[in-house]
Image (tube, rainbow, N blue to C red):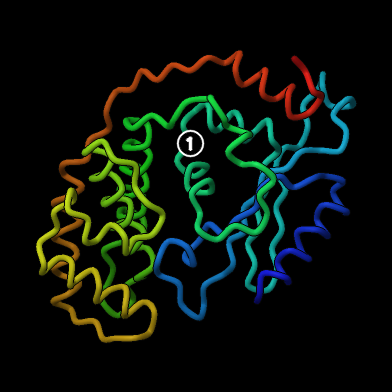
Amino acid sequence: MIKEDILEILHNIEKTEKIEILYACEAGNRVLGFANENSDYNIRFIYKKEDYKDYFFKKYIDVIECEGDGLDILGFDIKKALNLHYMNNGYLREWMISNQVYIDKGIDDIFLNLGGFDLDVLKNHYADIALRDWRRYCPLEFKNAKTEKYLRVIRSILCWKLLDCGIYPPINLNDMINHQLIGLDKNTQYTIGELIDYHCKEGNLSEMTMFKLDNFILNSLSHMDNVKTDSFKDLSLYEHRFNEILIGGE
C-alpha cells in the first residue's frame, strides 16, 4: 500500500464522518522497527468535527475506529487528544514523533507551550506495558513464541532505561539497541538483533537465543518498579487551546 492509497482512505473518513483530520501518522511495527510482510498499517489520527455547537453540553463519541484488509485505523477527537497530552500519555507521544506522517496541519501548534511529557509518567507507562505483555504472552514454548510480543517487551524496557537516564526515547527500536546511555553489552545487542531478523523473516533463532532474551527481560523487569508521580499541568491552558482550535476563542 502506498501513501496515496492511505490518504484516499483518510479523506473518505473525513467526508463520511464530517470531520477534518489535523494529523495522521503510522504508529505500528512499520515505525517501531520490526515490520514484516504480515504487519498491518496502524494509522492513527487526530481530528476535529466540522461543528461542535451541538456537542458542547453533552457527551459525544470522541473516537473513530476502522478496520480493513491489513489496516488498523484509530482516530481521536482533538479534545480527547488534548486530554491525553494533559495526562502525559505515552501512546500519544509516539504518534507525535512518528517518522511516517500522512497528514500534518500543525501538530506542533496543537500542543505548543503545553509543556513536555513527564518522564516518570512515561517510565510507568513503559514499565506497565513490559510487565503486562511479558505476563500475558511470554515466555511460551519456543516453537510457539510470539516474537512480536517479545520485541514489544524489549522495546518498552529500552524506552524505560532511556527515560531513567532523563532522555526521551526515539520511536524506532533499532535506534535504542546501540544507545550509549542504555549500555547493552555486545552479546545482548547481537541477541536482540537476531530476534529482529527472525521476526522479519531474515534469519534463524535458536533456543539459546530465547533463553538469553528471557534472562535479559527478567533481570530488567526486576529493576522497573513504578514510581510515584506528581505531575501537575495548568488545565486552563488546555481549555484555552481547545477554544483556539475550534471556535477561535481568546
Callout 1: SS: loop
Q: Nearer the viewer, residue 163 or 75?
A: 163
- Viewport quadrant of the C terminus: top right
Q: Residues within 10 Å of mark 1 (few under 14, many from 20)?
A: some
Q: Position of residue 47 (x, y in %)?
A: 73, 42
Q: Residue 49: which quarter of the image?
A: top right
Q: Residue 235: which quarter of the image?
A: top right
Where 146 sits versus 233, above or below?
below
Q: Position of residue 249 (x, y in %)?
A: 77, 18
On screen, residue 27 versus residue 248, left or right, reads left
Where 151 sits versus 20, above or below?
below
Residue located 29% across and 86% down the image:
203
Residue located 53% across and 26% down the image:
86
Residue located 44% across and 16% down the image:
232
Q: Residue 199: which quarter of the image?
A: bottom left
Q: Position of residue 174 (x, y in %)?
A: 32, 64
Q: How many numbered marks have been drawn onto this rendered protein structure?
A: 1
- Viewport quadrant of the N terminus: bottom right
Amino acid found under the numbered disc labelled 1: Asn
Where 14 sits versus 166, above or below?
below
Residue located 73% across and 71% down the image:
5
Q: Position of residue 27 (x, y in %)?
A: 53, 57
Where 86 sits versus 92, above or below?
above
What residue would you read off at disc 1? 89
